[in-house]
Image: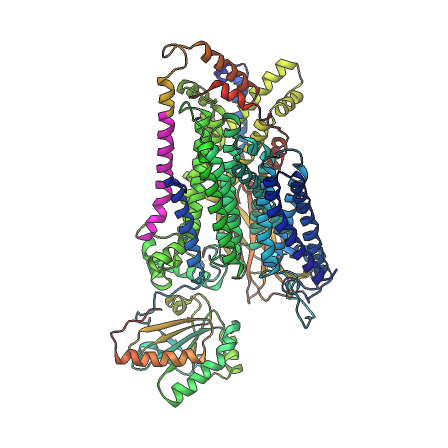
Amino acid sequence: MTPTIGYIFLTAALAVSLYGVFVPHLGVVRNNWNLIRSAQFATILNLVFVLAASAALVQAFVGDDFGVVFVWENSSSDLPLFYKVSAFWGGMDGSLLFWEVVLAGMSALVAYLYQRTNREVIPYVIVTLNIIHVFLLLLLVTYSNPLATQLPVPLEGRGLNPLLQHPAMVYHPPMLYLGYIGFSIPFAFAMGSLVRGKLDNEWVVTTRRWTLFAWYFLTMGQMLGGQWAYEELGWGGYWAWDPVENAAFMPWLTGTAFLHSVMLQEKRNMMKVWNMVLIIVTFSLSILGTFIVRSGVLNSVHAFAQSEVGPAFLIFIALAMVVAFTLLFKRIKLLESRHTAENLISKESSFLLNNLLFVGIAFTVFLGTVFPLLAEAIRGTKLSVQGPFFNTIAAPLGIALLALIGVCTLIAWRHSSWRFLVRNFRIPLGGALVAVGFSFAMGVTHGGALAVFAAAAFTATVLTLDFSKAVIVRKHQGDYAWPEAALQTVMRNQQRYGGMVLHWGVVFVFIGLAGNYFSREYNLTIPQGRTATAGEYQLLFKGFKSYQENNAQLRAAEIELYRDGELLETLLPAQSKYPTSAEPLTEVAIRRTIAHDFYLAMASENEDGSVTLRVLINPLVVWAWMGFPLFTLGVGIAILYKPKSLREPALERQYGVA
Amino acid sequence: MIRSWKFWGVLSAIGAVVALFAYGFTVDPKLVPSPLVGKPAADFTVQQLNGEGALTLSDLQGTPVLLNFWASWCVACRDEAAILQEAHLLYDVAQNRLRVIGVAIQDTPEKALAFAERFGKTYFLALDDEAGTIGLDYGLYGVPETFFIDAGGRIQYKQVGAVTRELIRTMLDEMADEMASPKQEKGS
Amino acid sequence: MNHGSWALSTPRLRAVFIIMALVLLAGAVFVPAASVPAADDEALERRVLEITDQLRCPTCQAISVKDSAAGFSRQITGKVRAMLKEGQSEDEIKAFFVARYGEWILRAPKKQGVGLILWLLPGLAIAAVGGWVGYVAFRASRRGEDEPEGGRHGEIGEAERDRIERDLRRFEEGF
């Protein structure tokens, strides 16, 4: 398949998307279900077409067809096949096509899954999704065509950015996209519900799994991005509060708020307007992320070069938000529920506080991200807003959220009393106290770290007690063995205990993050054959070594790492040269233990034969990576839960809470 | 139409954010204006790279100065090498209207000299010390960066990236005007 | 439904033991920081790292001078060390770089002028929204108390009792 045929497929995809925008509405107006069926079919056909276009691009990458501009810009013949395929999303135009493919896949799934259900709203779900398709495909066939060709055909490509030649870079962008785009589905259902005025909880219940799915991939995508930064960029951290990182973090924050507050709607019929607001904001922020990456408006290392698609994205976000909010306000009378928290001390209140904190952090991140622009507009000076600001404001809010997990687990729906709280908080607070005392005894004196450990221990204690209590009850009820009782407990309430596993993941991630408060750093210059000391470690520099790895030429320093005279490991921090890039890259060597990472980067090879090293002792980093299995398991359990059917709110109405 | 003040509040918020980003299209986030423009240039004394004598910046007052920071490892410096040499020959040697000085940073004397020879530079070249005293005093972000200092010893303009012939010509004219009417303050 | 079961139930001791073990386990892996008084040099280096962490790397821009290996970052680090040795304060050092690079070099704006908007707005916004939501919730809960559905205030009526029963059942079943 040639690039030209691929391009024709893109055009065809645009045509079927336009069909999908107009025909469902026609079907509703004429009350002709066949028209709606045909639009569902068109949505599936769209997937086939964009897949065909993508196949053309993949073929061009694998076949080193540098006549395709995008392939020439992002690949070279020496690139391993693995990276030739992932170069698909290594540049702007290709990543836009990738975005479209993922959205097309999800849209087709929606069209396929809800053929018989959700009949009232599905036509406008299809319309909403196809509007997004039309926008993306318009960009793809005009400004941002990844299949554009050039003559004469260059003999060699310019190569993939060496920084992107890392396994995490193969998985990280697709995962982020699955997350970003996943939120389009609940958004589309929300819009469908608003258009039809079908404002019960159906859309929330239907899209519950989609939301979890999107949240999971957005989370994984960001953690993988952190891992990539940690291992590949060589500066020793995994999160820099760069505008592009913030762009991914903001929809995650509002998405997480949404994930929690839909439970209030599902269980207590509250927050109906707020959930609409949250999904509109989350969707808009996920598009805004793409805008920030592509517009070059904010200063970011990750950003693609400034391009014409920036204004197009901005207009799209503005229109989407205006239309969505107009629809929302037209229906707001129908949505306003009379349900509020009945008592200030109740689970409902803790959910409200949860949302306030998440949205508060999102607002902080947004303000900090755009503030340089704002300051320039107001006062005409360039300012920087980086880690020191975000950490100062966001960390306390984050720690409050961590403790809130524990509080929320303890507290009951509707009603709780102070007496009850005090009694039940005694042991967890004791746990927190023990943790602080212990950390202090171990020499951790940083207030921030102690606060995290206290909150983590509090919440961990609550989660442990809560679960063991339930297991004990289960065991006595059914005369089960312990493991079976535990399994039964989890499977009988997948939502609650899936959530519990997720929250354990959060506890671990926070413990890992707290390590940042007391990391240590040393800059050492060691002559060959000599030893230097970094904290409790001794480093013996044996000499330099050169070798080849894939398409990179490496120059490494051989370092023997000792502690108390005992050889632990030989580390090879290196600098690598890629044929297509002038600047050498840092290849760090990391020795991971549960207490801390020994992080070694080679800063320079000096003319006198010595080596200059940057040594970081980063405490507790591996704890943060525990989030990977725990989030996976937690979402795996929670996604099994099937909300009780929609008839259930009758229960609510019967109570008639005034 | 919708009456709710909340709706119009939301709409205005959207409008404000969009306006802010639209404004973002008109400015380059990577371009940071130097606070040194309009201020007296920091004084320094340096040895000439080839060992022939030294120079103190304040001694040059009375004639505008083009102070160029460069390095042998810098690619854009190669692009502007010929232009700077040309400016030296034309405005300095022939017309005596401008002094051209090049200070290499983060470099070794050997490499810097080799670079100067390769591009046939004959103007005053020096090397910043290892601590980067001069470079830090001028708030450098990278190389090449070029400062235009007027006859009164004030920095009139800072160029990030390679200079062009037009820029040097324009700046010479402006600095001449500046001397004629010293009240006028120049921004970046 | 026994709300207070944690305090009363048999596994209480076991639970306490579990947390203690857990916390100790968590604590045991922390490496003690150097408890001996740090040498002068070490204290100086710590100050250097603290200050360079607040300065933005001019070359790489995304990270701090501390985290950067770029030439300018190394020179800035050297200058900071030299100024500290001369006895200059953190503010003086920052002022030195701001005069040459502009406020851009500070990784967080000063808490004055426009910078104040940045530092105060998040807290104010959260407090304002939190206060408003809290007020609405409080008023609603008051209203609920003023108009009890059955019986006199403080007495549980038939409907209310029924409602609590069902609620508790739901609570046990799930969330």
Side (left or right) of B138 relative to A101: left
User: Foreground residue, B69 or A378?
Assistant: A378
Q: How many marks?
A: 0
Residue A559 on image: x %, y %? 60, 54
Rendered location of residue C80, percent (x, y): 39, 58
For residue A372, above or below residue A415: below
In percent of the image, x 30 and y 80: which residue is there?
Answer: B177
In the picture, the quarter occupied by the C terminus of chain A is top left
Q: Residue A198 is drawn in which quadrant? A: top right
In the foreground, B143 or A246 = A246
In the displayed structure image, the side of residue C112 where residue A454 appears, left or right = right
Please tell me which residue lies in front, A630 or A155. Answer: A155
Residue A163 in view here: no
When asked about the image quadrant of residue A37, the answer is top right
Q: Quadrant of the N terminus of chain A?
A: bottom right
Instruction: Please provide percent x and percent y for residue A271.
Output: 47, 32
The residue closer to the viewer here, A77 or A640, is A640
At x 69% / y 52%, what residue is drawn?
Answer: A49
Tell me the residue at 70%/70% (across/down).
Answer: A155
What colouring does the structure picture have?
rainbow
Which region shows up in magenta?
C113-139
Position of residue B52 measured from the top left corner of the image (x, y, whole percent) = 42, 83
Give the residue furthest to the bottom.
Answer: B94
Residue A228 visible to an observer of this rendering: yes
Q: Residue C129: say if magenta.
A: yes
Q: Is residue B83 above or below residue C162?
A: below
- Residue A378 on the magenta span: no
Magenta stretch: dominant secondary structure: helix
Residue at point 32% right, 49% down?
Answer: C116
Query: In this rendering, is residue A13 above or below A26?
Result: below
